[in-house]
Amino acid sequence: MKKILAGYLRFRKDVFPQWKNHFHLLADLQAPDVLFITCADSRVDPNLILQAAPGDLFICRNVGNVVPPVGQTPGGVSATVEYAVKVLQVQHVIICGHSDCGAVKALLDKKDMSKLPLTNTWLKYVEAAWKYRNPSDPMGDHAAQHTALIQANVIAQLHNLKTHPEVASALAKRTLQVHGWYYDILTGAIQSYDQESRRFVPLEELTFA
Ligand code: ZN
């Protein structure tokens, strides 16, 4: 906790003064273009990896970067999606999974989750990942299987996202685009799901409007 408090003091003293004008503009209004949904994992830092400034990203984080399908018990993720799309009118929703994701590993290794009943219930949403595994993926070693399942989970959550009526409506009107990403903690590289080839390709290879 000492480290956290020292960081806060440094922020107030050294960093905030440099950002004062930026925060002055943001104090009464936010207009982010992007809803970024990712895992709660401490190693994934959306603002750092995208070099985004405060105000750029509307961020929703949870274990396993899950978006429950519409019709399930409404929760924080669904409310965040609704607000981002209907009120903030974001132009992009990005669902970003990451390497070494513990949520997906629990699924892959069929871990006994009986002592974590809430996590266990939440991770039921990740089970859909099995359905979206690319059948042409070679059944490699454990690490390769883990990566394939993390990427399949991103695709599964993209499908869930599209079940939300406000998302479906904005997609139909072409005012919204959705993206599935995979972030590699070791290299810092991002891959994006290409719907046509059904493959994750380096983000640098794609162009965005
Ligand atoms: Zn994770």
Image (cartoon, grey):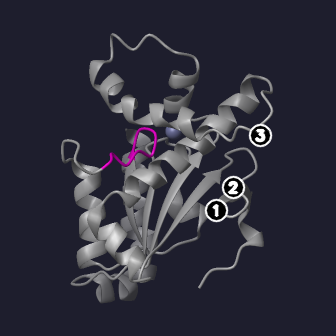
What range is drawn magenta here? 62-69
SS at mark 2?
A: loop
Q: Is residue 157 inside the magenta stretch? A: no
Which of the two residues, 79 or 184, is positioned nearer the viewer here? 79
Is any part of residue 17 visible from this angle?
A: no
SS at mark 3?
A: loop
Name the residue carrying label 2: 198
Mark 2 crowdedness (10 Å alpha carbons): few <14, some 14-19, many ≥20: few
Q: Looking at numbered disc 3 in the image, what kind of residue is underneath it?
A: Ser
Compared across the picture, whether 135 is left or right of 77 comes to right
Name the residue carrying label 1: 195
Question: CA–CA distance between discs 2 and 3?
Answer: 10 Å
Identify the residue at image location x=43%, y=77%.
176
Compared across the picture, whether 74 is left or right of 160 comes to left
Q: Are marks 2 and 1 in contact (CB under 8 Å)?
A: yes
Under 8 Å from ligand 1: the CB of mark 1? no
Q: Looking at numbered disc 2 in the image, what kind of residue is underneath it?
A: Arg
Q: Is residue 80 above or below residue 84?
A: above
Residue 67 coordinates in the image, percent (x, y):
37, 49
Question: CA–CA distance between discs 2 and 1?
Answer: 5 Å
Residue 50 coordinates in the image, percent (x, y):
59, 67
Compared across the picture, whether 197 is left or right of 95 comes to right
Q: Looking at numbered disc 1 in the image, what kind of residue is underneath it?
A: Gln
Question: CA–CA distance between discs 1 and 3?
Answer: 15 Å
Name the residue carrying label 3: 136
